[in-house]
Amino acid sequence: MKAQDDKKALLEALIQFHGHLCGGLAFATRVCEKATNELGVQGNDGKDLQAVIETSEACGIDAIQVITGCTSGKGNLNINDYGKHAYTFINRRNGEAIRILRHRDFDLEKIDPVVAKLRKAVFSGEATEEERKIFDQRMGKVADVILSMPEEELFTVRRFQTEVMKKTKAFEQAECSRCKEMVAVNRLNKRDGERLCIPCSDERM
């Protein structure tokens, strides 16, 4: 009973943080459960984990922050805009890592074709009030299905060992030669004897 209560409380916290319940939130919840169990890292303070996400457009990013405690502000959440639903978690204590990739056959349309059809209109803001209501109601059921699906139907898993890199913050700043704004020194690029911030450096290329 306690485990069920804990899961219910966690789901409520996720919904409060993210704003609504959806398939992406449910999927990432399963990803986090798999990662933390496999790596033996429990709790949501994030001190023993490093997370790397390979998409910048996923509701599940919020679930990862709440469940694992990995955040950009702490420096243990890296988001790479590769357009892949792939999630890597590294145990900082021993270098054990797991990469979880959404199964190629996982498809929202197979779970609920109506939700899949309405999704584009809802996310673009073009859905009617009635369509939005139907979408929200059915999406809750979709999330329930994902939370109970066999994991082999959701994702594939690869375990590996990696070197744990120590992350350091650069507190020293210097002026960009072009825009004259202050920049962390480890983000300055040298071009023709000048030290340029990333936007100014890109303009010169």
Image (tube, rainbow, N blue to C red):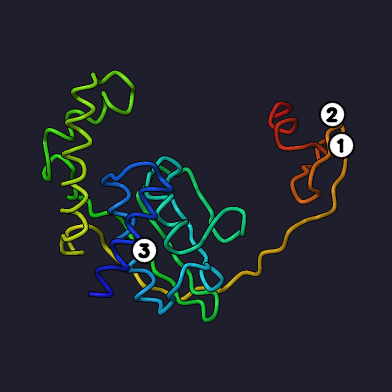
Quarter of the image for residue 152 reads bottom left
Three-letter residue code for mark 3: Cys
Secondary structure beneath disc 1?
strand
Left or right for 187, reference 54: right
Categorize mark 3 by other alpha carbons within 10 Å: few (<14), some (14-19), many (20+).
many
Secondary structure beneath disc 3?
helix
Labelled disc at residue 194: 1
Categorize mark 1 by other alpha carbons within 10 Å: few (<14), some (14-19), many (20+).
few
Q: Residue at x 62, y 69 (%)?
A: 165
Q: Nearer the viewer, mark 2 or mark 3?
A: 3
Tell me which numbered mark, 3 or 1, is placed earlier along the sequence. 3
Image quadrant where one finds the C terminus: top right
**Residue that mark 2 sits on:** 178
Q: Provide residue 43's location: percent of width, then percent of height.
A: 45, 72
Q: Provide residue 45's location: percent of width, then percent of height.
A: 52, 68
Quarter of the image for residue 130 reads top left
Tell me which numbered mark, 2 or 3, is placed earlier along the sequence. 3
**Residue that mark 3 sits on:** 32
Query: Are the residues flagged by discs 2 and 1 in contact, CB closer than 8 Å?
Result: yes
Image quadrant where one finds the N terminus: bottom left
